[in-house]
Image (tube, rainbow, N blue to C red):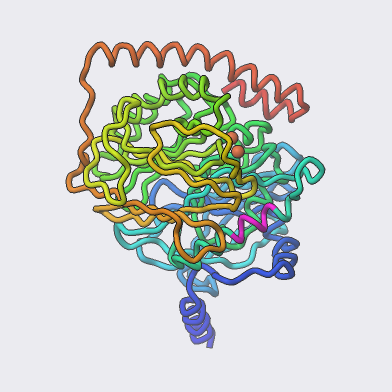
């Protein structure tokens, strides 16, 4: 009887798809918002590759956390993975567990356990080959400050859930969220819990990037549970480390652009690329919008950032760079060495350069048009609606489709095609330029050392837990 029940339940869950896609009314959101799993901030981050997933959730008590995983919804024949529990910045404990040895093309069911806390049972599906779909969003800006901002934790979290649902209504098999920074407006534990509240983020893996707003607190460090973090950086912003993961035939390089130390970022990218020699595509995620020119008073800062980042992107043949920060939608022409080498087109075969893209914010879209635009930009779109982008990735191509939340059709799309492993990228072997770039990276490392240390002491002055901050300083 137990086996029969298990079979029927599994069949029903599979028939109704792995990721729940439902139109969430505000009343339904009320019950999600007050659920134990939303209050615990349970979220599933990416693992090193498709065989892993990383989990975080918060509890008041410190216990050894575990995740029970099975291929059936009754969780019989399950495997238990244990993790660690670390003190968070607002008094709770953040529980981190990594699940490993997942098989490809398999539906898994899981629940998270720590002391008295036991989550609902959720499911996710591992990919079977090089094809997968991801949704890319930026500047989600979950915020608790309802006086300075018309939104609250609950509403900003609802807007994120709506955008995710909208993306899933277009492509129900999206299995990855790429978020390029400013997940939280003040870097607070309550904001990250609200970021995680959507039930969809229990079935879609999440890859976050640290933004300047995430650095306003120290919680990003304890909230995030990410693979292959580059902890050997001589200079880092302490709250976020560069990390990489692989999905399908894509190496994702996620970097902390708040930290100006080009020398450390160069070492990280080199190590990540050398560790994954067989991966065909390279996509970088960072927070700062380098090229749009949409916010003119930031242009002097952007010029310096371009001096640091563009040579790294060129040296390692990065195909696509996903950014945020300005809250304005732009897609660059094909750029190399900070110059246009080819126009942006609907299909680009083996472009000898890189596309840099910025999406609009989810909770703070900016659509005014009294602002600049640099010539490096091939397409821009002004809107006061939140936007998201669906990446359709295969071995030979990456297509990006951009939508306003609520629209049926994309307002823009383009495709990158690769016929060879390098996809047309030529290595820059000019010795004088390489020496200049190395000097820039060294100087930026010194500048970053002082600015990052200053930021951490500011956090300490702001009253964040001294032990946590001092622990980060002692790294
Ligand atoms: Fe932002
Ligand atoms: Fe930002």
Q: Residue at x 74, y 29 (%)?
A: 464
Residue 308 lies, with reference to residue 210, above or below; the image says above
Q: Quadrant of residue 342?
A: top left
Out of 165 and 18, give the one closest to the viewer.
Answer: 165
The answer to whether residue 66 is magenta is: no
Examine the rendering and report whether any part of residue 99 can be seen: no
Residue 392, given in percent of the width and then of the height, sits at 36, 57
The residue closer to the viewer here, 227 or 33, is 33
The overriding secondary structure of the stretch rendered in magenta is helix
Q: Quadrant of residue 21?
A: bottom right
Report the side of 292 relative to 89 (left or right): left
Residue that protrudes farthest toward the left in the picture: 420
Apparent side of residue 359 relative to residue 150 in the rendered image (left or right): left
147 relative to 302 in the view: left or right: right
Magenta residues?
Answer: 156-162
Name the residue rendered at 35%, 34% in the picture: 272
| 351 up-or-down from 41: above or below | above
For residue 19, side relative to residue 31 (left or right):
left
The reply to whether the magenta stretch includes residue 158 is yes
Which residue, as the protein is rendered here, is positioned at the far front? Answer: 370
Q: Position of residue 219 (x, y in %)?
A: 66, 37
Residue extending furthest right? Answer: 147
| Residue 123, position as x, y percentages in the image | 51, 66
Ligand 1 placement by image quarter: top right
């Amino acid at each position: 009887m137990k086996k029969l029940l298990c079979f029927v339940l599994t069949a029903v869950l599979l028939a109704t798809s792995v990721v729940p896609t439902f139109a969430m009314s505000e009343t339904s959101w009320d019950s999600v918002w007050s659920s134990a799993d939303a209050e615990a901030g349970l979220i599933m981050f990416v693992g090193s590759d498709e065989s892993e997933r990383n989990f975080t959730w918060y509890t008041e008590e410190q216990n050894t956390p575990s995740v029970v995983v099975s291929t059936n919804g009754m969780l019989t024949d399950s495997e238990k993975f244990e993790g660690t529990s670390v003190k968070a910045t607002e008094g709770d404990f953040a529980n981190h567990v990594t699940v490993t040895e997942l098989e490809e093309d398999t539906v898994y069911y899981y629940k998270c356990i720590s002391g008295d806390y036991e989550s609902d049972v959720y499911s996710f599906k591992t990919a079977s080959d090089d094809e997968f779909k991801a949704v890319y969003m930026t500047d989600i800006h979950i915020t608790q400050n309802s006086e300075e901002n018309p939104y609250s934790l609950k509403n900003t979290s609802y807007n994120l859930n709506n955008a995710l649902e909208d993306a899933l209504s277009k492509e129900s098999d999206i299995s990855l969220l790429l978020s390029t920074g400013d997940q939280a407006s003040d870097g607070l534990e309550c904001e990250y819990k609200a970021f995680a509240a959507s039930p969809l983020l229990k079935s879609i893996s999440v890859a976050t990037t640290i933004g300047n707003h995430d650095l306003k607190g120290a919680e990003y460090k304890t909230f995030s549970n990410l693979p292959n973090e580059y902890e050997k950086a001589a200079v880092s912003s302490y709250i976020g480390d560069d990390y990489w993961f692989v999905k399908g035939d894509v190496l994702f390089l996620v970097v902390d652009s708040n930290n100006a130390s080009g020398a450390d970022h160069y070492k990280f990218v080199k190590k990540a690329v050398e560790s994954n020699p067989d991966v065909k595509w390279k996509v970088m995620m960072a927070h700062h919008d380098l090229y749009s020119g949409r916010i003119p008073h930031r242009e002097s800062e952007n010029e310096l950032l371009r001096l640091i980042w563009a040579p790294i992107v060129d040296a390692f043949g990065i195909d696509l760079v996903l950014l945020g920060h300005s809250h304005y939608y732009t897609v660059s022409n094909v750029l190399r060495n900070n110059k246009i080498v080819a126009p942006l087109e609907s299909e680009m075969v083996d472009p000898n350069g890189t596309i840099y893209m910025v999406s609009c914010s989810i909770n703070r879209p900016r659509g005014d048009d009294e602002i600049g635009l640099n010539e490096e930009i091939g397409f821009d779109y002004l809107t006061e609606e939140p936007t998201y982008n669906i990446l359709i990735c295969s071995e030979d191509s990456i297509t990006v489709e951009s939508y306003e939340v609520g629209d049926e059709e994309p307002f823009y799309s383009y495709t990158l095609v690769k016929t060879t492993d390098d996809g047309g990228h030529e290595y820059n072997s000019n010795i004088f330029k390489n020496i200049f770039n190395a000097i820039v990276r060294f100087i930026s490392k010194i500048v970053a050392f002082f600015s990052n240390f200053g930021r951490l002491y500011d956090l300490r002055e702001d009253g964040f837990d001294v032990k946590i901050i001092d622990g980060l300083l002692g790294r």
